[in-house]
Image (tube, helix red, strand yellow):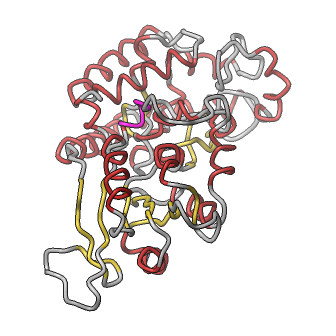
C-alpha cells in the first residue's frame, strides 16, 4: 500500500489484496444483488444514496449485542451511520446477515463501507482476523463492549448505551480536504459571476438553433455510487438518449463508456461547445451543491456505471470532478482502462498542488479546443 493513498477516504480500495476471492468479470451491480439479501438491499438504497458525510457500517456478529447496535443505527439516522448488514460465520444468511467474515474485503468494496463494528468480542481469533483485514482495507474498526449494566467511562463512544472502543482509525488530511472544498466553493461562485454573460449567450444560441431545453440534465454516478443530476449545456438533439442504443454498435471506446466520432446527434452549436468544453460550465452548480469538485474523476452515466466490474469501483471513492488527470493527459485515448489507471493515479497522488496543475492544464486544453 502506498502511503499517499491515505490522502483520500477509501483510496485503499484501489489496491485489491491478492488473496481476495472475487469474480473479476461479473458486473458490480450483479455482485451487490447476489451478496446482499435482506437488509443489504435497503442499506444500499438509503446508505449509498445518502447525503454526504454518512458512514456505511458493517457489524461483525449477528447476536444480541450486534442487533442492539443495528436497531439503534436504523432508529437514529442522526448518528450519521448507515447499517449495511451483519457478517457472521455461524448464522444463516438472511435477516440482516449478508455474508461471512471472509467476504469482508468484497463487501467493503462493493458497499463502499467506511467502518466495521466488532460485536463478537468473546471470539479472540475472529476479532484479530477481522481487525487485520479491516486495517489492510483502511477501514475504521470499533469493538463493542457488553458491560453487563455497568457504567462506561465518559471517554467511550456510546451507541444505544453500548460503549465502542476504537481499535483502528484512519488518519485523513482533514485540513486539506476542507481547503479543497472551500476552494471549490470560492472558484465556483467567482466563475459563475464572471462568466454570466458567456453563459447567457450560450443559452440564447442553443435556444435559437435547436428545439429542446437549454440544459441537459442526466443522472450520473457520484461518490460512493450515489446518483445525482449532472448539468450540462445541451449539445445534442432532443431525443439523443432514445437514439443512443441504436448507435452502440459504433462505439469507439473500450470498456463500459460510450463515445463515437462525428456523433450524428450533436448540433453544430454543440460541436463548438464540446470542442472547447464549454458545455461543462453548468457543472459549477453541481460543485456548489457538493455533488462534484473542480478536479476529480469524471462522473459516468448510470448505464455505463451499471457495466462496472469490481475493479472499477475505486474511482467512486472520491467526489467526481469537472476536469481530471485523464482530461489533461490522455483525452483522446479510447481505452477505458487507461482512463481508470489515471483516475487511480490521481487518487493515489492527490494533493492541492496537483489540483492546481490540472486546472492550469485544463485552461490550456480549453483554449486550444482539444475536446471531442
Q: Is residue 54 left or right of residue 254?
A: left
Q: Residue at x 50, y 25 (%)?
A: 278
- In the picture, measured across the screen, residue 153 lies left or right of residue 159, that is left
- Say if residue 223 shows up in the picture: no
Identify the residue at the far right of this view. 246
On the image, the x and y values in percent for residue 89 come to 52, 60
- Residue 260, by quadrant, is top right
Task: List the single residue furthest toward the bottom.
Answer: 149
Q: Camera-side residue: 209 or 8?
A: 8
Residue at figure coordinates x 25%, y 37% from the top left: 7
Q: Is residue 213 above or below residue 99?
A: above
**Residue 244 in the image: above or below residue 21:** above
| Magenta-colored span | 12-16
Q: What percent of the width, then of the height, locates residue 51?
A: 45, 59
Residue 181, magenta (yes or no): no
Total numbered circles: 0
Screen quadrant of the N terminus: top left
Q: Any magenta on residue 13?
A: yes
- Residue 243's place in the image compared with 325, above or below, is below
Q: Quadrant of residue 46?
A: bottom right
Quick one: 362 or 206, which is closer to the camera? Answer: 362
| Residue 312 image offset from top left, x and y in percent | 54, 31
Image quarter hosting the C terminus: top right
Q: Give how far across and how far down residue 121 sits, in percent.
A: 33, 68
The answer to whether any part of residue 219 appears in the image is: yes
Q: Residue at x 50, y 71 (%)?
A: 62
> Which one is in front, 142 or 259?
142
Q: Quadrant of residue 329?
A: top left
Amino acid at each position: 500500500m502506498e502511503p499517499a493513498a491515505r490522502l483520500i477516504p477509501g483510496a485503499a480500495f484501489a489496491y485489491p489484496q491478492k488473496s481476495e476471492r472475487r469474480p473479476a468479470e461479473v458486473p458490480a451491480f450483479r455482485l451487490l444483488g447476489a451478496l446482499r439479501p435482506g437488509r443489504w438491499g435497503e442499506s444500499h438504497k438509503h446508505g449509498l444514496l445518502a447525503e454526504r458525510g454518512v458512514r456505511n457500517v458493517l457489524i461483525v456478529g449477528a447476536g444480541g449485542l450486534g442487533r442492539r447496535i443495528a436497531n439503534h443505527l436504523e432508529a437514529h439516522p442522526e448518528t450519521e451511520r448507515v447499517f449495511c448488514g451483519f457478517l457472521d460465520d455461524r448464522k444463516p444468511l438472511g435477516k440482516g446477515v449478508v455474508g461471512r467474515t471472509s467476504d469482508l474485503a468484497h463487501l467493503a468494496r462493493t458497499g463502499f463501507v467506511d467502518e466495521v463494528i466488532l460485536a463478537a468480542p468473546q471470539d479472540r481469533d475472529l476479532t484479530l482476523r477481522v481487525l487485520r483485514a479491516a486495517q489492510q482495507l483502511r477501514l475504521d474498526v470499533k469493538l463493542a463492549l457488553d458491560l453487563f449494566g455497568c457504567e462506561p467511562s465518559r471517554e467511550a463512544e456510546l451507541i444505544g448505551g453500548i460503549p465502542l472502543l476504537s481499535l483502528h482509525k484512519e488518519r485523513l488530511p482533514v485540513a486539506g480536504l476542507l481547503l479543497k472544498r472551500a476552494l471549490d466553493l470560492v472558484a465556483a461562485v467567482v466563475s459563475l459571476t464572471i462568466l454570466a454573460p458567456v453563459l447567457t449567450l450560450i443559452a440564447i444560441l442553443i435556444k435559437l438553433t435547436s428545439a429542446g431545453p437549454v440544459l441537459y440534465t442526466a443522472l450520473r454516478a457520484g461518490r460512493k455510487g450515489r446518483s445525482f443530476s449532472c448539468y450540462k449545456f445541451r449539445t445534442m438533439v432532443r431525443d439523443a438518449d432514445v437514439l443512443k442504443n441504436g448507435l452502440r454498435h459504433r462505439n469507439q471506446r473500450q470498456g463500459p463508456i460510450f463515445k463515437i466520432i462525428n456523433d450524428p446527434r450533436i448540433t453544430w452549436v454543440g460541436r463548438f461547445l464540446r470542442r472547447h468544453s464549454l458545455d461543462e460550465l453548468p457543472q459549477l452548480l453541481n460543485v456548489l451543491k457538493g455533488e462534484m469538485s473542480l478536479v476529480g474523476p469524471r462522473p459516468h452515466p448510470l448505464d455505463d456505471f451499471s457495466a462496472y466490474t469490481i475493479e472499477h469501483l475505486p474511482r467512486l471513492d472520491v467526489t467526481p470532478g469537472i476536469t481530471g488527470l485523464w482530461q489533461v493527459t490522455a483525452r483522446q485515448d479510447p481505452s477505458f482502462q487507461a482512463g481508470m489507471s489515471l483516475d487511480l493515479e490521481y487518487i493515489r497522488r492527490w494533493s492541492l498542488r496537483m489540483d492546481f496543475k490540472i486546472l492550469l492544464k485544463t485552461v490550456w486544453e480549453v483554449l486550444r479546443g482539444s475536446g471531442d
